[in-house]
Image (cartoon, rainbow, N blue to C red):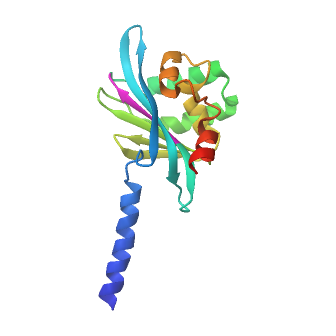
Amino acid sequence: MRLTTYIIALTICLSGVVQANEDPTRRLNKLGNGEFSWFGISLYTADLWRGVTQNEQGAEEATVLLNLNYNKNIPSKRIISVTRKEWSRLNTGSEEQQRTWLNTLEKILPDVSEGDQLSSLVTASGRTRFMYQGEVIGEVSDPEFGKAFLSIWLHPETRASNLRKQLLGDTVSQADLFSTVSETQL
């Protein structure tokens, strides 16, 4: 009897491990992909996904995933500096929110090298999970953070307007990114 109980418990534990390391795009659909260049130098390619994932309570929720595949080495300090400038320029969040978010990013984001992938998975409930090379490296639970972070690429006034169009296409706006998913796929 104890062996059976042990096997059942082990199976439950292992199934949780598999879900935690599951491919984040498994239940998502690719919206688009493109390249971001600065003065003719390709910094990274990006792809945008959306669909549904399961939250910790087992409920499905709308999810957006942005993958950045780097073509150049970029220190995390530079990524955070550009993020700060873009949030200020786009008037995203209050100054206090920006400071809090940037302090959190300083603890999460690594330096990236050519060939590295950095991803952000944002749920409709507001949780944002960061992954580096497919492994979770941090999470932000502020419900306003994820959409603010995605706005760097998806805001109508982004500096990456060509990339925005490639990621969203003509059919999806940033504002509709989560609502469209929740209406059609949940």
Instruction: Confirm whether the magenta stretch covers residue 70.
Output: yes
Image height of 106 relative to 27, above or below: above
Q: In the image, residue 64 lies at what x, y percent?
A: 52, 40
Q: Nearer the viewer, residue 53 or 87?
A: 53
Could you tell me if residue 127 is visible in this image? no
Count of all numbered marks drawn on residues in the image: 0
Q: Is residue 138 visible?
A: yes
Residue at 41% x, 44% y is 25
**In the image: residue 122, left or right of residue 7:** right
Q: Is residue 132 left or right of residue 48?
A: left
The quadrant where residue 154 appears:
top right
Q: Which residues are magenta?
A: 64-71
Residue displayed at 40% across by 64% down: 16
User: Was residue 25 drawn as part of the magenta stretch in this picture?
Assistant: no
User: Which residue is at the far bottom?
Assistant: 1
The answer to whether 116 appears left or right of 58 in the picture is: left
Residue 52 in the image, given as x and y percentages of width and height: 52, 49
Q: Residue at x 33, y 92 (%)?
A: 1
The percent position of residue 48, horizontal first and vertical second, equals: 47, 33
Where residue 37 appears, as percent x and y from the top left, is 41, 15
Image: 162 above or below 118: above
Q: Quadrant of residue 36?
A: top left
